[in-house]
Image: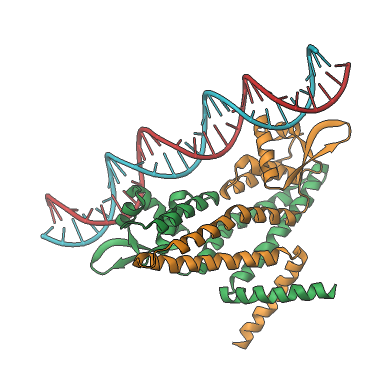
Chain colours: A green, B orange, C red, D cyan
DNA sequence: TATTATATTCTGTATAGACAGAACAAACGG
DNA sequence: CCGTTTGTTCTGTCTATACAGAATATAATA
């Protein structure tokens, strides 16, 4: 399977983007390729199209599965594994965010709490640190809570909300 | 200046966190250190406390300045530069998000638009890609718009809104 | 059971990025 | 001016990660 120029562009750019956000290039390229593929792909499709080694395909797919956005499917009469990216863009991003929260934000909150409880209040420096850590904890907790709320809404509701909020902010301005 | 154990914990963890989000460890550590420092710091303070080379301090500070969250200040009678992290946590995160949007999201939108306009509609594969790219573009554009709206709100309003939305979602459930 | 097809894990190499230390540049004080 | 303080840029080394290819495992068919 040969990529069209447009497909290449997209795959390459998405790969670069992924790298900037902390995932590796190949994984992001694979995600992009699966995203624009009408059918689930097998390892050979990917090897041919993206020109990467089988081992790399295998581990990158595993990574995408760890992120819970790719699953294995099968075609009738074909014993090879086929891989399918979560269809709905919105759901996919939500899944990624959920996962990041679980892996990174939640442990950070944990650490912050530990740091705060371990501050030595007799120590002047620590007292200041404590204040600041509490501030940071509050901020991240609020954002987390906010995200939890938001993530229950569908994209349509969010769209609707963007408009609602727009009116609300105009109202606030008017009342000042 | 010697870091207390709590300070070390925080600095180290924040450094690891930064690495996962695409900035380098030292830069993130420096951010953490500046965050809990009551006073603006000079290069020597940082060299002593974080045990890193002068050159590394210099370039890391430059990086933080590029992200627009650190600025140079001066102390009376001291000709060394002192560095100060943006005080308000919320404003700092907003600044970072703004910058990421500007550097990464906006160009991505640009690329997506280009890809879409260059799709060859005679080509079956490209037709499908086009659909999907449009879907992705819409999603990211909506999220961007949403962010633009949100970012005008202060943290207090968002807090308030989290509660408002909570009521709203209960209302929706009730009406089903 | 042997053979082939498929997928995973292991191992060595290559590469990009981080970083220290040196060299350099600029500003200040004597 | 000349030495000293301070900050930046350059250069080489080290390290972590990405990745290819080989080895291995697993499963299917004959």
Return the x and y of residue B27 as percentages of the image width and height.
Answer: 65, 41
Residue B169 picture location, percent across and down: 65, 79
Q: Return the residue nearer the eye: B149 or B53.
A: B149
- Quadrant assignment, res A102: bottom right
Residue at point 84%, 75% (across, down): A175
Q: Residue at x 69, y 41 (%)?
A: B30
Q: Is B11 left or right of A155, judged from the image as shown?
A: right
Identify the residue shown where x is 76% and y is 43%. Answer: B71
On screen, residue B155 above or below B176: above
Q: Quadrant of residue B163?
A: bottom right
Residue B96 visible at all: yes
Residue A100 on image: x %, y %: 56, 58
Decide which of A102, B4 is in the foreground and name it.
Answer: A102
- Comparing C28 with D4, the one in front is C28
Q: Position of residue B121 (x, y in %)?
A: 39, 67
In the image, taking residue B145 as reference, residue A136 lies left or right, namely right
Query: Quadrant of the image for the C terminus of chain A?
Result: bottom right
């Amino acid at each position: 399977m040969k990529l069209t120029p447009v497909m290449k562009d997209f795959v390459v750019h998405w790969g670069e983007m992924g790298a900037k956000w902390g995932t590796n290039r190949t994984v992001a390229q694979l995600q992009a390729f699966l995203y624009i593929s009408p059918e689930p792909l097998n390892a050979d499709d990917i090897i041919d199209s993206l020109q990467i080694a089988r081992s790399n395909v295998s581990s990158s797919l595993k990574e995408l599965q760890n992120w819970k956005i790719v699953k294995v499917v099968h075609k009738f009469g074909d014993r090879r594994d086929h891989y399918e990216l979560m269809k709905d863009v919105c759901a996919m991003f939500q899944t990624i965010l959920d996962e990041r929260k679980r892996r990174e934000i939640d442990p950070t909150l944990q650490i912050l709490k530990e740091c705060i409880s371990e501050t030595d209040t007799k120590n002047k420096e620590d007292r200041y640190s404590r204040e600041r850590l509490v501030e940071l904890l509050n901020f991240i907790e609020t954002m987390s809570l906010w995200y939890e709320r938001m993530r229950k809404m569908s994209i349509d509701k969010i769209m609707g909300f963007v408009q609602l909020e727009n009116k609300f902010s105009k109202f606030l301005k008017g009342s000042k």
